Amino acid sequence: MHDSATKPAVLVTGGAGYIGSHAVLALQESGWPVIVIDNLTTGFRWAIPDGVTLIEGDVGDMELLARIFKTHNIRAIMHFAGSIIVPESVENPLKYYANNTANTRNLLAAAVEAEIPHFIFSSTAATYGTPDKVPVSEETPQKPINPYGMSKLMSELMLADIARAHPINFCVLRYFNVAGADPQGRTGLSTAGATHLIKVAVEAALGQRDHVSVFGTDYATPDGTGVRDYIHVSDLAAAHVLALEALVASPDESMTMNCGYGQGFSVNQVLDAVDRAAGVTISRRIEGRRAGDPDAVIADNSKILARLPWKPRYQDLDLIVRHALAWEQQLQARRN
C-alpha cells in the first residue's frame, strides 16, 4: 500500500464514460493521482470530477499517449475505452476490432515503450459466449459468439503475450451485468440509447419509453426469462482500485478475475424491482428470443473474493435499481 504522497499516477482511458467515471471517483477517493483520456464520443466532460485532468483524444493515438505518459509520469493504466453494444458489433464488426482490439494494441505498444509496469483491463463475460454450465468460472472455455466478445478476448490474449515478453503485469476483470449508479449521485449511465435492461426499465418507469421488451419467456429458468448476474457499478469500481493495489504489491503476478456477485436475477425479477422502486407498473412487451442469448449467466466470483480484500457494499437488486432510478431522475431534470 502506498500513502497518497507516493502513489503513482494512473491513466484512465474512457474515464468520462459509465464505468470509467466511477473508477475515477474510486481512485480519487483512495488517493491516486488520476489522468483521464477520453474522446467524448460516449463520455461526458461533466463526469470528470474536480482535481482530475481530462485529455480529449483517442486511445489509439500513440504519439499523444507517449506525451501523456511522460508529462504526467504515468505508472499504471486502467483501460475502459471501447465499444460495448453487442448487436452493433454484429452489424459493424470492424468498428469493434478498431475501437477494442487495434486501439488496445496501440495503447499496449505505447505502454511498453514508456515502461509502464501495471495494466488493468476492462473485459467481459461475453468472452465466454454461451457457457455450458453456471456459475461461470475463469477456467470456463472462452468461445465468444459475437464480435464484441471476440474483440475483448483478443485484447486479453495480447495482454498475456505482452506480459510474458515485457516487464508489465496485468489484471483482467471480466464484468458480468454492470448496473446502478454512484450512490451520491455524481455519475451514472448517461448514454442515450443504452441497451442495459435496468437503464431501459427505469427510463420506461419515468415515461421516456412506453414499454420494455422481454426477449423470450421460454428459457430454462424459474420464470422462463433470461437470468443475469447484476453487479453495482460502484462495487465494480472498488474492485479496480483493489486490483491496482494488488498489481503494485505483487509486480511479478498477473491476474484474471470475474466481477459479479454469484447470484442471478431474471428479466421479470428486475422489472418487478423497478416497479417497486418507481411505484408504477411498466408495460412489458413479450418478443421473440434474440440470437445468442443464453438462458442464464452467473459469475463464479470465488477467485476475486479470495485474491482481493473486496467486500461488495451494494449487493442488493432493489438498491441497484433505486440508484439507477435516482440517476435517471437527475438526468431527466437536467434535460427539462
Image (spheres, rainbow, N blue to C red):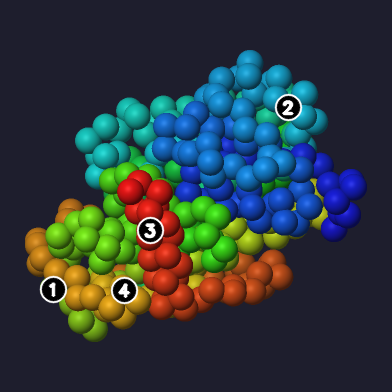
- Which residue sits at x=31%, y=74%? 278
Discs 4/1, front:
4
Discs 2/3, front:
3
Q: Amino acid at mark 1?
A: Asp
User: Residue 233: x, y in percent?
Assistant: 51, 61
Callout 2 environment at 10 Å: few (<14), some (14 to 19), or many (20+)? many
Discs 2/4, front:
4
Callout 1 environment at 10 Å: few (<14), some (14 to 19), or many (20+)? some
Q: With respect to residue 95, does 15 lie above or below?
A: below
- Which residue sits at x=27%, y=63%? 206
Q: Amino acid at mark 3?
A: Glu
Q: Which mark is residue 69?
A: 2
Q: Secondary structure at mark 1?
A: loop
Q: Amino acid at mark 4?
A: Ala
Q: Earlier in the sequence, mark 2 or mark 1?
A: 2
Q: Is residue 198 visible?
A: yes
Q: Which mark is residue 328?
A: 3
Q: How far is mark 4 from mark 1, CA to CA?
A: 27 Å
Residue under circle 4? Answer: 278
- Which residue sits at x=53%, y=36%? 45
Q: Amino acid at mark 2?
A: Phe
Callout 4 environment at 10 Å: few (<14), some (14 to 19), or many (20+)? some
